Image (cartoon, helix red, strand yellow):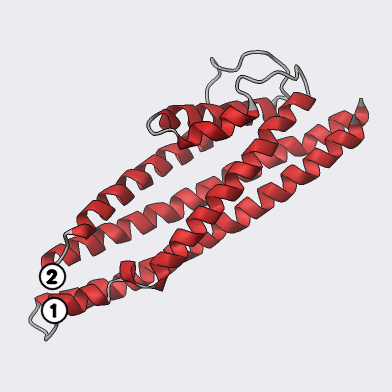
């Protein structure tokens, strides 16, 4: 058992590190997008002040149509895949310690993220369950009544805020043609990227905390 536990822990730790690296990449791209957005905002402000710039030219230079947006999309998709792989491993590790019981099976811990509306609540419950069981070595049967860590709740709230703002941005950007509309979209985009930076930072902290707790599993296993 110690050898098995050590092996799965190494796999989980690798997943946690890869997830953290990709989250940092998302953070960096959001920061770059903020810089580009500020430049875009300045361009639009000059156009609205009377500079020779037609709306089509402003739209063509918008960051969302450039390579930054494509890189963000690729980074987000890659991070999501690696995140789920890490989550599956980390949640499965709980069957090797303590009561060896789980509230959810590892497959559902992944599948619920793909169900609209359900994922808003269930994914958070799974992350809470993973955190608390990892922290306490899965030493009890029920964790539902325990309060969630403040960091986890804050991260989830910021992430939901980011998702809602990003959805609104996408809808508004479809019909943004005038200088005023493009300015509003650019301003909202700056807010979305700023919230994205915070969400990525908090997500990195969540992954590191859960991984830190699971690092103790190996010590307990060896001691046993």
Label 2: which residue? 179
Q: Residue furthest left?
A: 50
| Image point (17%, 62%), residue name | 176
Q: Could you classify mark 1 by the number of other residues whose Cα lies within 10 Å: few (under 14), some (14-19), or many (20 or more)?
A: some
| Image point (23%, 59%), residue name | 173
Q: Percent position (x, y) of residue 133? A: 67, 25
Report the quarter where the C terminus lies: top right
Q: Could one spot residue 61 in this view of the protein?
A: yes
> Circle 2 sits in a helix, a strand or a loop, which is it?
helix
Q: Residue furthest bottom?
A: 52
Q: Nearer the viewer, residue 198 or 106?
A: 106
Report the quarter where the N terminus lies: top right
Q: Could one spot residue 42 in this view of the protein?
A: no
| Image point (52%, 37%), residue name | 151
| Image point (66%, 20%), residue name | 102
Q: Percent position (x, y) of residue 21? A: 62, 58
Is 18 above or below relative to 12? below
Q: Quadrant of residue 179?
A: bottom left
- CA gap between label 1 and label 2 equals 8 Å
1 or 2: tag closer to the N-terminus: 1
Is 9 placed left or right of 73 in the picture? right
Is 171 placed left or right of 147 in the picture? left
Q: Percent position (x, y) of residue 6? A: 85, 39
> Circle 1 sits in a helix, a strand or a loop, which is it?
helix
Q: Quadrant of residue 172?
A: bottom left
Q: Percent position (x, y) of residue 123? A: 50, 32
Q: Confirm or deny contact between disc 1 and disc 2 (CB under 8 A).
A: yes
Label 1: which residue? 47
Is 39 placed left or right of 15 in the picture? left
Is 157 placed left or right of 214 in the picture? left
Q: Which mark is residue 199?
A: none
């Amino acid at each position: 058992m110690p050898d098995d536990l050590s092996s799965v822990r190494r796999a989980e730790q690798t997943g946690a590190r890869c997830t953290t690296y990709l989250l940092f990449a998302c953070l960096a791209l959001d920061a770059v997008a903020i810089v580009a957005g500020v430049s875009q905002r300045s361009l639009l402000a000059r156009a609205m002040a009377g500079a020779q710039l037609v709306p089509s030219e402003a739209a063509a230079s918008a960051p969302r149509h450039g390579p930054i947006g494509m890189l963000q999309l690729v980074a987000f998709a890659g991070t999501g895949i690696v995140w789920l792989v890490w989550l599956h491993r980390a949640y499965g590790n709980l069957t090797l310690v303590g009561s060896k019981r789980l509230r959810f099976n590892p497959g559902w811990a992944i599948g619920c993220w793909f169900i609209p509306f359900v994922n808003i609540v269930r994914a958070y419950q799974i992350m809470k369950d993973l955190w608390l069981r990892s922290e306490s070595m899965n030493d009890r049967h029920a964790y539902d009544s325990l309060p969630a860590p403040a960091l986890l709740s804050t991260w989830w709230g910021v992430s939901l805020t980011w998702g809602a703002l990003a959805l609104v941005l996408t809808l508004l950007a479809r019909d943004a043609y005038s200088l005023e509309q493009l300015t509003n979209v650019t301003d909202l985009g700056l807010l979305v990227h700023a919230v994205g930076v915070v969400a990525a930072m908090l997500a990195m902290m969540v992954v590191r905390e859960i991984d830190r707790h699971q690092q103790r599993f190996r010590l307990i296993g060896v001691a046993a």
